[in-house]
Image (spheres, rainbow, N blue to C red):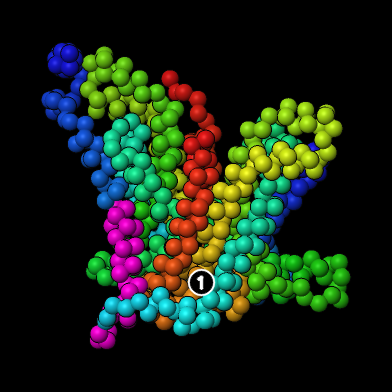
């Protein structure tokens, strides 16, 4: 029975990773038409170096993801402090209001943003993408930092205050250092959410300002070469690295008290 | 008491001298919450309201055509019966994807709980969840490499049977469901795993030692225990799948017409924003109805 179970899990992993591996391998195949047999070549990675639109879209993606991570982590951590440590009326309503950006299909949110930003004069482009990406990342930050708060005991702060520290000082010198891994994890998470976001970006990008996923999508639909495989490989490895570092910092399953 | 503390703190000089008197709690609470909820209002709530308004307009308010308020966009399902068929196809796409994810994911969760331990299980979980947090678009694209004519699958087949024809299923509904299952399976594995990991091994061993066969254990213990995970997984998969447009476009080609692609077209090709808005809102109504139906199960999972 155990053998069958292990065999089945390996089959699931093969199902999950085979297409990704094939896609990555094809980025190193000489033929522009994806013809086999396989001939190793780095020509598509070299071609990538001179593909200005793709490189610019890649740079845009990274810049947007960095700014999103900074803004979303700051705002989300502030909200998480209030939601985790304070009691006030309407708290559960506020917690429910964090769900729409995660739970409503992005197609609906994205088209709604397109209509509103057009109608209100905000328009499309970099600032619109930032408004959208930060909104999608904030709920994840609040959740991740909120989980972190559960492991930091509230009485530590009280102890600091009874020893003469002000609330602000107690927060910054006691709670924040203990919370640091969660906040860093949340920032990486926000970075990955933004880097991988396609649907919202698709509706808010302009011909002059796109992100990498939007550029890849239009390439897939209009005809493409293994350059797309090369840049996709880099994108996948980038977000996998971010998530693995996140898992290292935030330890999602860890609920031990930090003392 | 508090003044004593403050005085004590000030004589020590260890605090920020700007802080004289603690502000009322509600001021700081509001200050902490305002940026987040202001941002969400601007980026999500106001847009949804505006879209609701647009869905009652007779035309996109861009050109010179006068715009009136009308319910005609919501009559689209009656006026254009092909939309009903597309809506039905989208629901079926959601149904099949969810069903396959449920079967494969439940079994994977059982295998994880029963056949692995410790570090090996942790590593397997990370490996299963890792693709989920990478770019969905790229993963869908990767299936075109496997499924296309003379692609990876065809080449494997030709190694075994050189004369066989192509078994390419790219640009069929099967390819769309396959790509969607690939995208959402880790979700179901995770929700079922969370539900099953709490089962005490002793229960199953007791059942087995009392003579229960494996199917009895499956139907009487494992499936009931995993039910909350199965339901929340199903909800969390079905909802994004019926709103998907990029998977059907890339893997379905001409047969991949779904509610999602029709809505996308209204905004990027046809520029009929009011129709797109009313279709988006119809989809949102379906989504909210599903959440309302299963909210008890979903809340139970997040609380526990």
Quarter placement of the C terminus of chain A = top left
Classify residue B249 as left or right of residue A66: right
Classify residue A196 as left or right of residue B101: left
In the picture shown, does residue B150 fall above or below B183? below
Nearest to the observer: residue B139 or residue B110: B110
Residue A202, position in %: x, y? 43, 67
Quarter placement of the N terminus of chain A = top right
Residue under the image location 68 percent in, 57 percent down: B100
User: Can you see residue A28?
Assistant: no
Part of the protein shown in magenta: B39-66
In which quarter of the view is residue B111 placed? top right
In which quarter of the view is residue A29 placed? bottom right
In which quarter of the view is residue B164 placed? bottom right
Say whether residue B55 is magenta.
yes
Say whether residue A37 is magenta.
no
In the picture shown, does residue A34 fall above or below A152? below
Q: Which residue in the rendered view is the most extreme toward the bottom?
A: B65
Disc 1 secondary structure class? helix
Nearest to the observer: residue B206 or residue B142: B206
Q: Residue at label 1?
A: B259
Residue under the image location 31 percent in, 16 percent down: A159
User: Can you see residue A94?
Assistant: yes
Residue B203, position in %: x, y? 73, 29
Dot 1: chain letter: B
Count neighbours of disc 1 (C-alpha within 10 A) and say few if under 14, some if 14 to 19, many if 20 or more. Answer: many
Residue B278, position in %: x, y? 40, 72
In the picture shown, does residue B60 fall above or below A16? below
Residue A214, position in %: x, y? 46, 67
* Number of numbered labels in the structure image: 1
Residue under the image location 32 percent in, 39 percent down: A91
Residue under the image location 44 percent in, 79 percent down: B76
């Amino acid at each position: 029975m155990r053998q069958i179970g292990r065999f089945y899990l390996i089959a699931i992993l093969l199902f999950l990773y085979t297409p990704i591996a094939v896609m990555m391998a094809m980025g190193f195949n000489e033929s522009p038409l994806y013809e086999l047999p396989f001939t190793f070549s780095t020509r598509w990675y070299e071609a990538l170096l001179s593909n200005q639109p793709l490189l610019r879209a890649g740079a845009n993606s990274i810049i947007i993801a960095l700014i999103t991570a900074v803004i979303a982590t700051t705002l989300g951590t502030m909200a998480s402090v209030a939601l985790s440590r304070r009691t006030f009326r309407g708290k559960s309503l506020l917690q429910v209001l964090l769900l729409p950006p995660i739970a409503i299909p992005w197609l609906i949110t994205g088209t709604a943003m397109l209509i509103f930003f057009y109608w209100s004069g905000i328009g499309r482009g970099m600032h619109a993408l930032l408004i959208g990406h930060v909104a999608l990342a904030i709920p994840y930050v609040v959740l991740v930092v909120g989980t972190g708060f559960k492991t930091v005991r509230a009485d530590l702060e009280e102890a600091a205050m009874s020893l003469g520290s002000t609330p602000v000082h107690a927060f910054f010198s006691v709670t924040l250092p203990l919370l640091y891994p969660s906040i860093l994890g949340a920032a990486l998470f926000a970075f990955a959410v933004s880097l991988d976001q396609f649907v919202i970006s698709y509706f808010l990008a302009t011909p002059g300002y796109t992100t990498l996923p939007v550029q890849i999508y239009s390439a897939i639909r209009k005809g493409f070469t293994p350059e797309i495989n090369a840049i996709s490989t880099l994108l996948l490895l980038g977000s996998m690295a971010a998530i693995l570092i996140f898992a290292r910092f935030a330890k999602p399953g860890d609920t031990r008290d930090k003392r | 008491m508090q003044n004593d503390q403050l005085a004590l703190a000030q004589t020590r000089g260890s605090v920020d001298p700007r802080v004289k008197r603690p502000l009322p709690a509600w001021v700081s609470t509001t200050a902490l919450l305002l940026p987040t909820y202001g941002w969400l209002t601007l980026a999500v709530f106001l847009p949804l309201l505006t879209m609701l308004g647009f869905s009652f307009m007779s035309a996109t308010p861009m050109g010179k055509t006068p715009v009136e308020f009308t319910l005609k966009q919501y009559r689209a399902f009656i006026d254009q019966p092909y939309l009903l068929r597309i809506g039905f196809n989208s629901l079926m796409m959601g149904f099949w994807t969810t069903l396959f994810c449920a079967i494969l994911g439940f079994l994977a969760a059982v295998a994880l709980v029963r056949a692995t331990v410790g570090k090996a299980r942790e590593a397997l979980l990370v490996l299963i969840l890792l693709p989920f947090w990478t770019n969905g678009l790229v993963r869908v694209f990767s299936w075109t490499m496997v499924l296309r004519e003379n692609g990876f699958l065809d080449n494997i087949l030709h190694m075994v049977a050189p004369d066989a024809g192509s078994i390419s299923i790219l640009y069929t509904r099967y390819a769309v469901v396959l790509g969607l299952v690939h995208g959402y399976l880790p979700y179901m594995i995770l929700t079922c795993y969370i539900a099953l990991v709490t089962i005490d091994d002793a229960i199953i061993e007791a059942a087995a030692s009392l003579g229960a066969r494996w199917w009895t254990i499956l139907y009487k213990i494992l499936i009931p225990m995993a039910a909350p995970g199965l339901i929340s997984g199903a909800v969390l998969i079905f909802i994004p799948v019926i709103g998907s447009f990029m998977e059907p476009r890339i893997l379905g080609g001409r047969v991949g017409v779904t509610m999602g692609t029709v809505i996308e077209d209204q905004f990027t090709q046809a520029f009929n924003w009011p129709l797109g808005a009313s279709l988006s809102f119809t989809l949102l109504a379906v989504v909210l109805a599903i959440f309302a139906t299963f909210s008890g199960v979903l809340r139970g999972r997040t609380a526990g």
